[in-house]
Each structure stands twice: as structure tokens, then as C-alpha cells.
Amino acid sequence: MLPVHIPPNLIETEFLRSVERRTRIFSEGNVPRAVILDGEPGTGKSVASLYIARKMNAKAAVFSAENYQHFVASPNSSEGMVSGSVMGEMLRPEVLIINDIDRLDTDDQLSLLDNLDTAKSYAKIIFVTTNNYRKLIEPIRRPGRLDDLIHVPGLTNEEVRQVAPDLPLAIVQRVHNWPVAYVADIQRRIDILGVEDALKELHLLETRLSEVRADMKNERN
């Protein structure tokens, strides 16, 4: 399993609260739910999943997609270290989080679907994350096997001010809709370097984000 840290100063955005409310409704109705969280890198999909598990006082197990497929054998395969049912008995997670399933090839995505059917027998909520929803095979994207598709947005102006309270207003306008990881990094630089020197490095983060977004756009095309 992967260690994923929840920042102690995590900002509870309206997006997080709305997803948590919806998840709780299904959980309290004893209805297992599998949810795709889709968003560009740095939007906090894994942290959002763990935030929801913590708010529900639920035990969570976190895997990368590759590690999960290596660890868990699908019902139709002998590969993997343990069966899905055995893993459920071993870890007993109420929330299962599998990150970056868009990195799997077609065969592994099909195998993952079989595993998720088993996982619903022990996990109340399953979150799978993706940076590029269009890379998922059609059986995953259509309703039925995974129940909800939720797009994780960048930050609003108000949320930028919460994450990076020392940013000048003009810069807030410039970085709104950025993933939270990038905005949090600006604040960390401000804390160490001061506002003036940190903002001199803003173009470095802009370049990195532009490159990531360009790569994702090319993948979609």
C-alpha cells in the first residue's frame, strides 16, 4: 500500500464537502459505490479520497494501479499474490483507493474491472483516480461498473487565497484554476524566500504546468 499524507492545513473546499456528502449518503444506505476521480496532476485526487475516508472514520487502503494489479489476482487469472477476497480479509478496508488507473494497458484495465467487482464485497467506497479519463477503456467509462465520474477542478480565486494567503491579488487572478499542488508550492516558496523572490520563480511553475497540460492535450488527441 502507498502512504498518502493529508496536509494538516488542508482546505475543506466546497468541492470536497459536496463529494463527502454524496459519498456518505450511499455509505449510510449500505450501497457500495465505485467512483472515478478525474483531474490533471496535482488537483489532490488521492488527498480528497483520504479526506473523505477520514471524515467517515473509515479504514482506507491505498494502492497505485500497477501495485494493486501485481498484488491482487483477478477472479479470471492466476497472476497476483493473493485473491481479492483474501485481500479483503487481510486488510478489511472500508475505503479502497486505487491511483492512476489510466496508466494500465487494456488487458490490465479489464482485469481491474473483475477485481473491483470483488472489492465491492468488502469496501463501502472505492475511489479510482485518473489524470486522463479518455485513456480508460469503454467498459470502465460507461455507467454500471463504476458508478460515478467526478471531475476534480482547479482552485477558485477564493480557494487560492485560502491555500496561499500571502499571494498578491494580481497573482491570485493569474493562478486561479491551477491545481492545488502548484498553488501550495507558491506559498511554500513565499514562506522560505519571501514574497518578492518567490514571485520571481512563478514562471517556473507556469512552465511546468503548461508542459503537463500540453502533454495531456496531445494524449487526448
Image: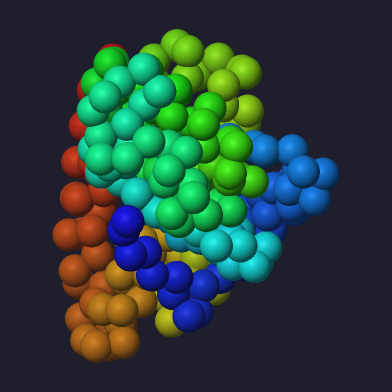
Q: Residue at x 35, y 22 (%)?
A: 111
Residue 213 visible in image: no
Q: Which residue is drawn at 64% across and 46% down?
A: 124
x, y percent for residue 217: 29, 26
Left or right: 219 with respect to 30?
left
Residue 186 visible in image: yes
Q: Which residue is drawn at 59% across and 67% down?
A: 54
Quarter location, residue 137: top left
Front residue of this view, candidates 202 and 96: 96
Which image quadrant: the N terminus?
Answer: bottom left
Q: How is the image coloured?
A: rainbow
Q: Is residue 189 above or below residue 56?
A: below
Front residue of this view, candidates 188 and 119: 119
Front residue of this view, candidates 119 and 4: 119
- Count of numbered tags: 0
Quarter location, residue 71: top left
Left or right: 34 with respect to 133?
right
x, y percent for residue 145: 57, 21
The residue lying furthest to the top in this view is 138
Which image quadrant: the C terminus?
Answer: top left
Left or right: 22 with respect to 131?
right
Q: Which residue is drawn at 58% across and 36% down?
A: 120
